[in-house]
Amino acid sequence: MKTGDLTTPALIADSKTLETNIATMASKRPGRTLRPHVKAFKSTALAKKLVEAGHESFCCATIRELEGMVKAGLGNDLLLANETLDATRIGELLTQEDCRITVAVDSLETIEAAAFAGVKEVLIDVNVGLQRCGCSPEEAGFLSEKAKTSGLQVRGVMGYEGHLMHDPDVHRRTEKTQESMELLISAHEAVGGEVISGGGTGTWECNQSVTELQAGSYVLMDGDYSKLDLPFKEGLLLLTTVISTSKSGYAVLDGGLKALSVDSGNPKLLGEGEVMFCSDEHTTITNGSWSVGQRVGLRPSHIDPTISKHESLFLVEEIEESLETELLETLEIDLRGW
């Protein structure tokens, strides 16, 4: 079967790029110094490729991801790097053999929910500048003591400097990351424990404070991340078909907002031309020459929400501009949902 046999829109991935990206990260962040974030790719089959590279602990953003990872036999050290007020399903998972789940908490309410559900281990989530979840660094020690008195083991702290991930100035990104991590380290001094968890693809090299890096997008890379000075390459493509052309110079593809995310900007064309705009089922392109029925590839600007829109990811040896190549493997995107 070839890419030309696929019903479009369809997600295809370059296996050589995937392997190179995984190897590059593993050389710098081996074993448990990396906690890959499965929210980026939503696939236990792809997670198993990371296990083959030496990574056995994983980050999850949803309880559904936890459930899928445990079912796939990948639950020996999972972190829900997100707050939840309904941890009942997590408690049920913990009754299974070889299942270890740590949960992020940042308030008395999330501590109470974790303890009530039978969760045993937590990290204190600290706000290091993103203005998302996380307690203030000054509250971390207090919350740690409350968690311990509730019967929870506090493994350490986590803090995500997500507001710095896409800063194009590497020197500024490095300096600001260090400032954020100083907040996390101060919280860790009050909390204790062996874990300092945080970071991501954008700070994979400059964040030297964390004991485990929570990176995920690096495996196939965002178009937005590709603007930075990172050694990882884009390996994901939305395969589409030209379904209409105009004499005024534009063409229309059969994949749009329901097949890819544009929160980080429009996708980029593989080959000539540029994207004018995306609508629900369509992307309009210009400054090129296309014919109805022609296959066209789009590089998404943000892979995480793009992948979550699809049921399958089709691996090819290498993506070529001809877009006519053999399929090597189909990876089920089985961690979608909540």
Image (tube, helix red, strand yellow):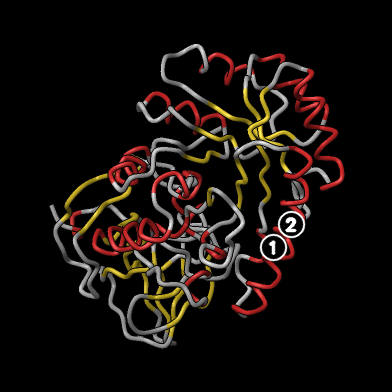
The mark found on residue 130 in the picture is 2
Residue 109 seen from this side: yes
The mark found on residue 224 in the picture is none
Residue 322 location (% of width, % of height): 20, 74
With 26 as the anchor, is 330 left or right in this view?
Answer: left
Q: Give the vertical position of 274 relative to 167 (above or below).
A: below
Q: Give the vertical position of 8 relative to 107 (above or below).
A: below
Q: Give the vertical position of 69 relative to 234 (above or below).
A: above
How far, Cα to Cα, is label 2 from label 1?
Answer: 5 Å
| Cβ–Cβ under 8 Å for marks 2 and 1 | yes
With 240 as the anchor, is 315 left or right in this view?
Answer: left
Give, as a three-letter code, the residue at label 1. Answer: His
Give the residue displayed 59% in from the left and 78% down from the top: 170
Secondary structure beneath disc 1? helix
Between 141 and 57, the residue placed more toward the observer is: 141
The residue wearing badge 1 is 163
Give the residue displayed 75% in from the left and 44% down from the top: 189
Secondary structure beneath disc 2? loop
Residue 80 location (% of width, % of height): 58, 35
Between 258 and 143, the residue placed more toward the observer is: 143
Give, as a three-letter code, the residue at label 2. Answer: Leu
Residue 230 location (% of width, % of height): 46, 72
Q: Residues within 10 Å of mark 2 (few under 14, many from 20)?
A: some
Residue 312 location (% of width, % of height): 33, 44
Residue 259 location, quadrant = bottom left
Q: How many marks?
A: 2
With 93 as the anchor, is 46 left or right in this view?
Answer: left
Give the residue displayed 82% in from the left and 25% down from the top: 146
Q: Give the vertical position of 314 relative to 115 (above or below).
A: below
Residue 122 location, quadrant = top right
Residue 238 seen from this side: no
Between 247 and 253, the residue placed more toward the observer is: 253
